[in-house]
Amino acid sequence: MAEEVKLLGFGGSPFSCRVEIALKLKGIQYEMIPQELANKSPLLLEHNPVHKKIPVLLHHGKPICESVVILEYVEETWKGVPLLPEDPYERAMARFWAKFIDEKCLSTVWKACFSKGEEQEKGMEEVLGLLKTLESQLEGKKFFGGDNIGFLDIVADFAALWLGVLLEVAGVDLLNDSKLPLLCKWIEEFNNCPVVKETLPPRDMLLKFFKMQQAATGPQYK
Amino acid sequence: MADSSKVTLLDSWYSPFGMRVRIALAQKEIEYEYKEENLSDKSPLLLQMNPVKKQIPVLIHRGKPVCESLIIVQYIDEVWNQKSPLLPSDPYQRARARFWADFVDQKIYSLGKQVWLSTGEAQEAAKKELLDTFKLLEGELGQKPYFGGETLGFVDVALIPFYTWFSSFEHCGNFTMVEECPKLVAWAHKCMEKESVSKTLPDLKKVFDFLMDFIKKQKANK
């Protein structure tokens, strides 16, 4: 029943999109309740008083917060298309690389894209190193999850769209076939998946938004 | 079926992250080989097993490394699932446990370090946020003996090692935990009644002296 599952989210957020992709892969009907990032609704503050952030999944009225925690919840609650591997070691690997993306990659990319001059140069070197490390996990595979997209592909959604947009705004050519061949191929495959196409926001909208951010005072996004 | 393949833990005696893994292994009564790592002179084995972060703890099972303390604890829970479950079976309760363990990870280490190393207004702000963090955790604990309910669970394992840091926070921040967070202190004492905790956590004075020495060196380097 659609009314059982609600998502407090934001179409332009990679974290929110992760949850939408997962729900769609599982064939779960949900109601999206769009949130404004700058103007937090009473509903959001009620259901995520600790972090006051989207996404928040509401299932039978009970809130689940933090996108990766929500993904694990979706996986455990609804059978059907598996998001995580069955083998505990492979699951640990998927979780490790998801943590790597969230703790190292995202913040390094943000910082590098919104800095200038030498600081940006150094930052971009670090970004390239991290992305090369990440793409090594794609060796011999179509997706991080193997033949089909899984947990880690979903967590990596940032790389499929926001990364390229931010690099373009920063005027840095990093995401190309010679520097990151495996990642570039993955981006193409990932973006070709029907549920991904349905979910990710339009690129030109994101580009416009981040160009405005850069012209103003830097990343207000988070 | 209990897994009897060799288990090795690369760790450092004072690391609260390593303690999490040791407590989990003790709860499950898993025999393992402990290897003490000197983090200023990392062993070839550590660098080989955790080339990405080069950090302890690392669990080596069936020759394969698992890294990141909470990921290791979940791995242990999934492989040795016959006894002492650390995560509950209900998906919503599991999501809550993961959320609060992640909260511990996001807050305590970074705020704690600021209480140790900063001064004046910055230190006061960090101290306030750290105490707010502990009070939120007290709220989540509620009337339960453990975060896991009647038994030690995932959040207890994630948090209890930081009990070894309480006296250092008190000393640097000029407060007492028993005054500010009496419920949490009571909870810590309750955890210490469990052998898996009391035999794992190093002597509190030894940790305090070690941390004071570390803080002195850090401040001298600034």
Image: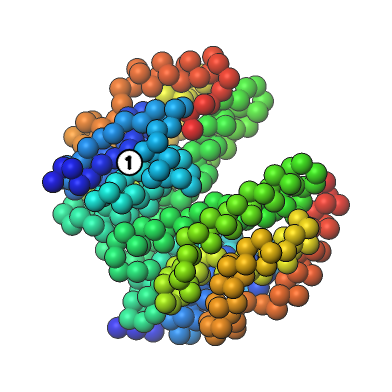
- Tag count in the figure? 1
Q: Residue at x 39, y 80 (%)?
A: B84
Q: Is residue A42 visible?
A: yes
Say left or right for B213 vs B33: right
Residue lying farthest to the right in this orientation:
B220
Q: Is residue A56 left or right of residue B27?
A: left
Query: Which residue carries the number 1 mark?
Result: A18
Secondary element at tag 1: helix
Mark 1 closeness class: few <14, some 14–19, many ≥20 residues within 10 Å: many
Task: Say which residue appears at 62% left-offset and 67% top-offset.
Answer: B182
Residue A23, given in percent of the width and then of the height, sits at 23, 44
Q: Residue furthest left?
A: A1
B28 and A153: which is toward the camera: B28
* Chain letter for mark 1: A
Q: Nearer the viewer, residue A113 or B35?
A: A113
Relative image position of residue B181 (x, y in whole percent): 62, 63
- State the image quarter where residue B48 is shown: bottom right
Residue B7 as seen in the image, left or right of residue B179: left
Colour approach in the figure? rainbow
Q: Position of residue A192 (x, y in %)?
A: 23, 33
Q: Residue at x 81, y 64 (%)?
A: B213
Residue closer to the observer: B119 or A205: B119
Is residue B44 visible in the rendered image? The answer is no
Amino acid type at mark 1:
Arg
- From the viewer's side, name the closer residue of A45 and B161: A45
Query: Residue sitting at 29 percent across and 40 percent down?
Result: A7
